[in-house]
Every structure is written in structure tokens, then in C-alpha cells.
Amino acid sequence: MSSIPEEYHDLVMEKPTFTTLTTMLPTGMPHMTIVWIDYNPDEDRVLVNTERGRRKEKNVQNDPHAGILAPDPESWWRWLSVAGEVDEVTTDGARDHIDALTRRYLGEETYPNPIQTERVIIEIEPEHVITFSPDG
């Protein structure tokens, strides 16, 4: 069962929602970065695609706590916040996944940037979900 309410699935599955991902640095300080986002409702996992060795991937390998803040690109008054733990970092399907995200976010068929190492998907299990909409 999905922990993200269905009426917010558009933010994480359909719209090009530029999302803030927060992970924890080795010093214990938060590290925030803007990412493309996806969601697997069947597994109830928030998905972030990145490249192996980037700071966010290193952070979650060290400390699995992570969170996202996803404002609606059409109305910043409507948003979704998810906090939880990373339960998997995988290369399985990561290359195809970044291309799917590229189609949603850029309208292009394939990811345009050179891949230096390999793509990975960070899977976050939602533990705390907060939503807000001015419509209630």
C-alpha cells in the first residue's frame, strides 16, 4: 500500500517536479540538492537517480536517513514532504530509469549528459509523509 496519498502521485510520477533531496554528510550536517524524482507505488519507494560516487550516493551509503520536499511546479502552495531511510541503492534498471526521467523532465529521449561512472537508483522507504494544499 502506498504511503504517499494518491492525489499527490502526480508530483512524483507525472509532473517535472524539481525536488529537494536532503541527505546527511559524514559530519552530521544536512546536504541538500535539487533532483528529479520518481515513485514506485507498488513497492512504496521514492526513487532518486544519480551517478555512482556523487555526494548524495556517498551520504546514503554512510547514513541511510533521507528526505524530499516536492513542490508542485504549477503551485508552490501545494507540496509533498517525505522522510525515511534508504533501503537500497541499485544499478538495476538505472540507465533506463534516467532516460524515462529525461523524457518527463526535458522532453528528450535519452539522458543528454555523459555518464562518468554508472547510474544508480536510491530507493527511499517513506516513514513520515506530510502533504499540504491550499484547497485542503
Image: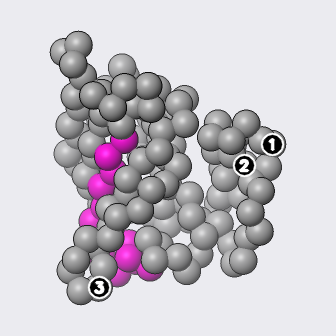
**Residue placed at 42% from the left, 47% from the top?**
19
Mark 2 touches mark 1? (CB < 8 Å): yes
Residue extending farthest to the bottom is 27
Would you place residue 115 above or below residue 49 in this image?
Answer: below
Q: Is residue 106 above or below residue 87?
A: above
Residue beneath the point at 79% across and 49% down: 110
Marks 2,3: beta carbons within 8 A: no
The answer to whether 46 appears left or right of 133 in the picture is right
Q: Earlier in the sequence, mark 2 or mark 1?
A: 2
Q: Which amino acid does the dot numbered 3 rest on?
A: Pro
Q: Position of residue 86 (x, y in %)?
A: 36, 62
Between residue 20 and residue 50, name the one nearer to us.
20
Query: x%, y% of residue 55?
Result: 46, 77
State the extent of the magenta-drawn residues as a range.
Answer: 58-70
Instruction: State the residue position of label 3.
Output: 26
Q: Earlier in the sequence, mark 2 or mark 3?
A: 3
Which residue is situated farthest in the right direction here? 109
Local SS, label 2: helix
Task: Please report the residue visible at 19 percent of the width from the left and 15 percent of the height from the top.
Answer: 136
Indicate which disc, 1 or 3, sits on the residue closer to the N terminus: 3
Real-space CA distance between mark 1 and mark 3, rounded to the nearest whole angstrom: 36 Å
Q: Are marks 1 and 3 in contact (CB under 8 Å)?
A: no
Q: Secondary structure at mark 1?
A: loop
Mark 2 — residue? 99
